[in-house]
Amino acid sequence: MGVPELHPQLEPIAFLLGRWEGAGVGGYPTMDSIQFGQEIVFGHNGKPFLTYTSRTWLLNEAGDRVRPLATETGYWRALPDRQIEVLLAHPTGIVEVYIGEVVFHKIELRTDVVARTATAKEYSAGHRLYGLVNGNLMWAYDMAAMGQPLQSHMSAELKKVAEFTGDEEPAA
């Protein structure tokens, strides 16, 4: 079947396509500081959106995987004039809609809508920054949750380990 042709609207965010792996740090007033590993997969099927899956796991001091952490999945929708919408779902009962802008290889996103199930933790806003720096995907995430104002929560640096091949499933 082969790799589908990239929809022209996706050109500003095509640099995201592929599988990325790396490590980062996290912390928040309501939690201990952590080191984590991450895998992000961006794919497409020829339509004007990217598919997105992120998996993280806790790392010990030696850099070994300890246990799974957060996962999220969704769609990145490129719009005219370098605008972007990102829809994310979390298995913890949270769904987010981000809106933002693409400037060269930098993407800045802010939550427009946050919806939570009755059993989800209190979470009210997010701000995400993604950028391609020296070929690596760098990102930072600020969060407002658990009665805390919007503040730094997590960041990571990921290396591209696979180009998009048409197989959107993350590696096992």
Image (spheres, grey):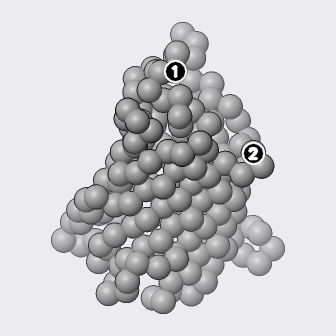
Q: Nearer the viewer, residue 58 or 33?
A: 33
* Residue under the image location 35 percent in, 54 percent down: 98
Residue under label 1, please give it.
6
Instruction: From the viewer's perspective, tell me whether residue 140 is left or right of residue 81.
Output: right
Where residue 74 appears, as percent x and y from the top left, is 40, 45
Q: Residue at x 75, y 67 (%)?
A: 64
The numbered dot on residue 39 is: none
Instruction: Please indicate, yes or no, whether residue 43 appears anywhere in the rendered image.
Output: no
Considering the image in quadrants, where does the N terminus appear?
A: top right
Q: What residue type is labelled 2?
A: Gly
The quadrant of the picture occupied by the C terminus is top right
The spot of residue 86 in percent (x, y) is: 38, 47
Q: Which amino acid does label 1 sit on?
A: Leu
Residue 135 is marked as 2
169 up-or-down from 128: above or below: above
Residue 93 picture quarter: bottom left
